[in-house]
Image (spheres, rainbow, N blue to C red):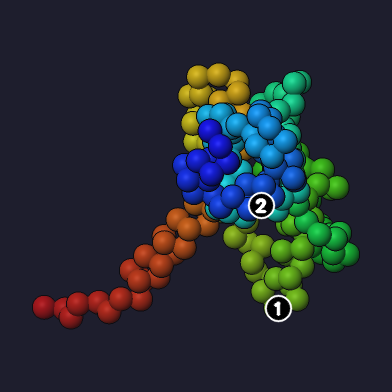
Amino acid sequence: MRVAELSNRSGVPVPTIKYYLREGLLPAGERTSPNQARYSEEHLHRLRLVRALVEVGGLSISAARDVLGALDDPDKSLYKAMGTVEKAVVALDGEPSSDEVAHEWVREFVTRHGWELEEDSGVYATLVNVLTTARQVGQDTFVDVLDDYARACVDISERDLDWVMTAPSQDAALEMVAVGTVLGDAALAAVRRLARRHAAQRRTAPRPPCP
């Protein structure tokens, strides 16, 4: 198919497709003339994946390139891909704060749950900076909800892996890891807001008068 058909079928404008090609997110098509190229169903599939990562998942072009690179890695493994996707999703500008209280809270939290977390990772920096910000705005007790978050997330993570394990091939599983992580984070945030709104309404709704 030509680029115009690729655009029509994917819903991605031609200039955006050309941008993705320049940035290496989409492999080049088969050159048929100096100014023309032919694209396949594989290009269409990859374009839809790029769109999911960038437009829905909110990844930067650089982060999306890292995720796609993990999928194309000839030595790819499920665990390695998970690490690459996680690093791309939680990419953080700058360093973790110097708030030692926040650092200690994160270390204690991770140890308490028996988890492993490298202190040079984006996840560690994110947690430290979140707790530092909470302290700065006078919400020190925010740290107390982390254990409840952890218990809920263990179950969510098991469901994630159950879903990935239904993949018919390793390539499909790796793609499910990428899509599930990026879109799963967005979906989880949306579901959390819906659930919180429902809980707030249930707790604050006027009670019917006693008979």
Q: Nearer the viewer, residue 60 or 44?
A: 44
Residue at numbered disc 1 = 137
Quick one: quadrant of the C terminus?
bottom left
Residue 94 is left or right of residue 78, and the answer is right
Query: Does residue 193 appear anywhere in the picture?
Result: yes
Residue 77: x and y in percent read 70, 23
Q: State which mark lies toward you, 2 or 1.
A: 2
Q: Quadrant of residue 206?
A: bottom left
**Residue visible at 50% across and 41% down in the picture:** 5
Residue at numbered disc 2 = 59
Q: Amino acid at mark 2?
A: Leu
Decide which of tag 2 and tag 1 comes sooner along the chain. 2
Residue 210 is left or right of residue 88, and the answer is left
**Residue visible at 84% across and 48% down in the picture:** 119
**Residue visible at 70% across and 78% down in the picture:** 138
Residue 49: x and y in percent read 57, 40
Q: Nearer the viewer, residue 95 or 128?
A: 95
